[in-house]
Amino acid sequence: MPKTSQRGQLMPESPIRKLVPLADKAKSKGIKVYHLNIGQPDIQTPKVALNALHTIDRKILEYSPSDGIKSLKSKLADYYHRFNIDVNENDIIVTTGGSEAVNFAFMSCLDPGDEIIVPEPAYANYTAFAIAAGAIIKSVVSTIEEGFALPSIERFEDLITPRTKGIMICNPNNPTGYLYTQSEMNQIRDLVKKYDLYLFSDEVYREFCYNNTPYISAFHLKGIEENVVLIDSVSKRYSECGIRIGTLVTKNKELKNNVMKFCQARLSPPLLGQIVAEASIDTPEDYMREVYNKYLERRNFLIDGLNKIPGVYSPIPMGAFYTVAKLPIDDADKFCAWLLSEYEYEGKTVMMAPASGFYTNGARKNEVRIAYVLDKEDLKQALIILKNALEVYPGRID
């Protein structure tokens, strides 16, 4: 048989989805699984979005322009203006989800052997798309003990070589929920400017910044406008992950021309998804406020409950709807698999994402990412299950 590609062999498994077969097997036995592993909200999609889907009246479901429907891009520009992000529709490229935006950004900016610096833990697909582009991730590890604050800029500079092309951040952060401060963003800006790097900034969770903590976009940073590549998606803010609509936003014309070639090669982003996304931008403010308050309440409930379990610690996330928790266990990959394959509490168990998959070197084997995308009653049950599981887990470490 012919050999498969080295690139495919190097591609990491998703820490979020790799345990799905174990979850499916548990369900087949009648065990209820509480899914805290994936950022799939249980929030209902806005009515304006669903109405747009239900009332589509077209005789042909045609290709859209490769960079997206003009009316959607115009409304997206208006949306960004609400956050003081000074872009226009010509700066916006519509993509098939935020994931494709990351992929096209890397493919358009990085040559094989080029390097990007990423604070970790980080969204696992950054590594996957870097591998696809033939690029190399250089990680700067933040720690749970410091609340996952930005590591010192000196540690970033220690990693810079002639092949360094950019820095990738997620703000608010997936998986930690950390929200970068103005001071931290200014330090990143100064580094980008000093070494003329790209700043890839994933800002999918901007709606979810808690306790009046300010959201600082990469486009708020003066003097690096053409270095910034903003990654975005409608998936989380409108609870419509399945329509697969994201954006890549850049003021760099040469970069945009490169990205457009990849857009043309895949023809067009999803037509039906764009129709729904355009309608979603008119979502009433009371819907957004209700969703925000719901996540804030869930966050407070979950973090309080986690920190009451002996040996468990989670810092308070200031954004998104995730947290990383440290558990008194030997290996989170084994523990998460054990929960699905060998453990149940009153016919129920919990699915979480091992945090090792959010580090390129698999560090921090005793951490998990938890998504608080379930209602408080489900979170309450999940916490009970987790507490009891930790008491009997064979690999517990006190």
Image: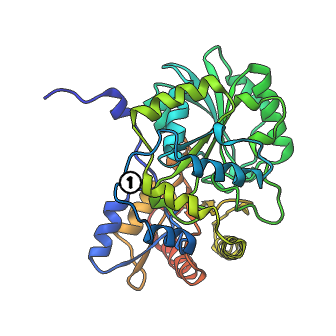
Res 126 visible: no
| Residue in front for this viewpoint, 295 or 149 | 295
On screen, residue 230 above or below 278: above
- The secondary element bearing badge 1 is classed as loop
The residue singled out by tag 1 in the image is: 18
Q: In which quarter of the image is the C terminus?
A: bottom right
| Residue in front for this viewpoint, 101 or 343 | 101
Q: Quadrant of the N terminus?
A: top left
Decide if residue 130 is on the left or right side of residue 254: left
On screen, residue 144 above or below 89: below
Rendering coords of residue 35 (x, y %): 46, 69
Residue drawn 34% across the image and 70% down it: 342
| Residue in front for this viewpoint, 281 or 155 | 281
Query: For the residue marked with disc 1, what is the amino acid?
Result: Lys
Res 292 visible: yes
Residue drawn 53% across the image and 30% down it: 259
The structure's colour scheme is: rainbow
Residue drawn 64% across the image and 49% down it: 74
